[in-house]
Image (tube, coloured by chain):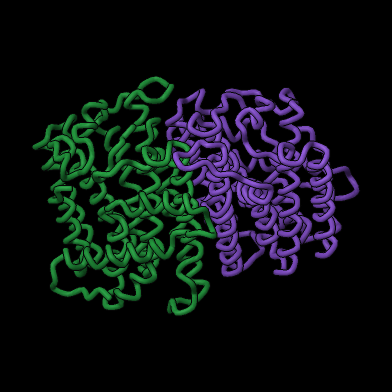
Chain colours: A purple, B green
Amino acid sequence: MIVASAQPLATFVEAARARVDAALAAYLPSPPACSPMMSEAMRYSIFAGGKRFRPVLTLASADAVARPGGEQAMQLAMPAACAVEMIHTYSLIHDDLPAMDDDTLRRGRPTLHVVYGDGIAILAGDALHAAAFTLLAREPRETGSGVGPAELAARKLRVIQAIGDAAGPSGMVGGQAIDLQAAGQARTPRLELDADGVRAMHAKKTGALIRAAAASGAVMAGASEQTIAGVDRYATELGLAFQIVDDILDVEGVAGELGKTAGKDAAGAKPTYPALFGVERSRAMAAECISHAKAALEGAGLTEGWLPAIADWILHRRS
Amino acid sequence: MIVASAQPLATFVEAARARVDAALAAYLPSPPACSPMMSEAMRYSIFAGGKRFRPVLTLASADAVARPGGEQAMQLAMPAACAVEMIHTYSLIHDDLPAMDDDTLRRGRPTLHVVYGDGIAILAGDALHAAAFTLLAREPRETGSGVGPAELAARKLRVIQAIGDAAGPSGMVGGQAIDLQAAGQARTPRLELDADGVRAMHAKKTGALIRAAAASGAVMAGASEQTIAGVDRYATELGLAFQIVDDILDVEGVAGELGKTAGKDAAGAKPTYPALFGVERSRAMAAECISHAKAALEGAGLTEGWLPAIADWILHRRS
């Protein structure tokens, strides 16, 4: 059990990560339901040392809207937290493929296609994608959830729709396709993105799933429409700041800390915030987003809990 | 409206296909929700002249279990029918990639990656995959469905779980991974499949989604557990026959009718029924499955409707 009090964010995040890891280990399909290789391939990427930013955000959001019932809310939100992480992981597997970003290293380890070949990597990604939705439909079970069957079903369907929209052609996958077009990697005329275009691309590519992660926590916890809207405004700003900081970290070449090839964005002529605005202005933009994110929390009466501290963490992270 | 009477199956199938095509056109995301290229890429593969076997089966199953209320049942099942077709189409896009089966032609047209490049093809497949689950969570809407909100939500969640399981690591994607391993295309020791292994592989790779297509129709139509089980037994046999006939058609080299490179299975050393049992024995096995499928329908009291005729169609199809 995570006791939310005056303890520092690190304590909450560490405990939440451990719970997410345990839940993922339990939820991921295993033999004999799937083949040993498929199970190993999925686990190789899921347990590759990710930060678990998105599922921690889902749990923090569930906790924040349900205080003092945060513990039960986090249990209700755990399947959504894991599903978001499974979708995030599948997207990394596919993005790393030679047909896309062609990355051979992630978090200091060989990427999945380097280990199993491109075909199995595509399929392991597809497997995590499908398994995420199966999980969302199945869990949490009604028994012991403390929520009536009709209400629980309604929350699940809303979360499936939110996460599906965020992951699909209007969200993450759509943003990645625009990114490929802008990098001249699609067999279509190269797309020229201005500052607004880059912002819109990132809002889809990384922002949409971060928003869905936060909103899912609030929905599973039974938050009001007004509170869900506040969490969504917060997460929109948070997602933008997350991407700007990501771009800055890449430019600054902290390859060792990132565990991937630094400077890759510039080398691939990908449109980034530092390339468009310079590092200093980008830093100021990220800080401004975080300030807006906190204002959104105040407007929604969500100043208790970990959401404000998570915003600061995103701004100051080094990996 | 499809009037089910003594008309031949072809009339039902033609009308059902037209309705599925219209529903798919309405359900697929369009600009400005997604980019023009993403919309075009998804539609290129969805409207590539597929047989629509799976969605027709979903509608026929809904109709059969709900007679004489077949028309309303088919409307309830239409989103599931379309979602199954979207998932089937995404799987074809990914299977055709150079990293897997490396097919450049399907139904007489260049495959998606030939047109847009591998990266966009992977993403368009991912987009259809996510959009299928969003659709299942969203549609049918409660208003005018004739089903109460709690019951409708319960049916939707059951269908999402069935289709997700069928598409995921325990189903379609898991079967394709075993197929790649057996063909020596994974960076793991080559898998040797005996007859039982080939049967199990196909039960996952093609059988699972065919079963989910049929079961989803019955679930959305509000069938009893006993009836759903009967439909599932029918579809299990149907799916096996479908695959055996597919293998035979490939061996017989009806490339023109199939619109793809015939003899490709043998060339790629893929395990097939004719390779294991010869063409004549394979034909007899397919006929036996169809006979079992019809017996399952009789056991469930589902002799009215199109399901028996669909079984015959599968056995005698030439494409």
Q: Is residue A122 left or right of residue A8?
A: left
Along the line of sight, the residue nearer the viewer: B198 or A41 = A41
- Determine the image quadrant of residue B262: top left
Q: Can see residue A11?
A: no
Residue in the picture at 79% in, 33% down: A318
Q: Does B219 sit above or below residue A60? A: below
Along the line of sight, the residue nearer the viewer: A164 or A270 = A270
Residue A281 pos. (x, y %) = 81, 42
Along the line of sight, the residue nearer the viewer: A61 or B18 = B18
Residue B117 pos. (x, y %) = 43, 37
Residue in the picture at 65% in, 32% down: A265
In this view, the residue farthest toward the top is B189
- Determine the image quadrant of residue B102: top left
Q: Is residue A150 left or right of residue B261?
A: right
Residue in the picture at 42% in, 54% down: B162
Q: Is residue A133 left or right of residue B58?
A: right
Q: Is residue B173 left or right of residue A213?
A: left
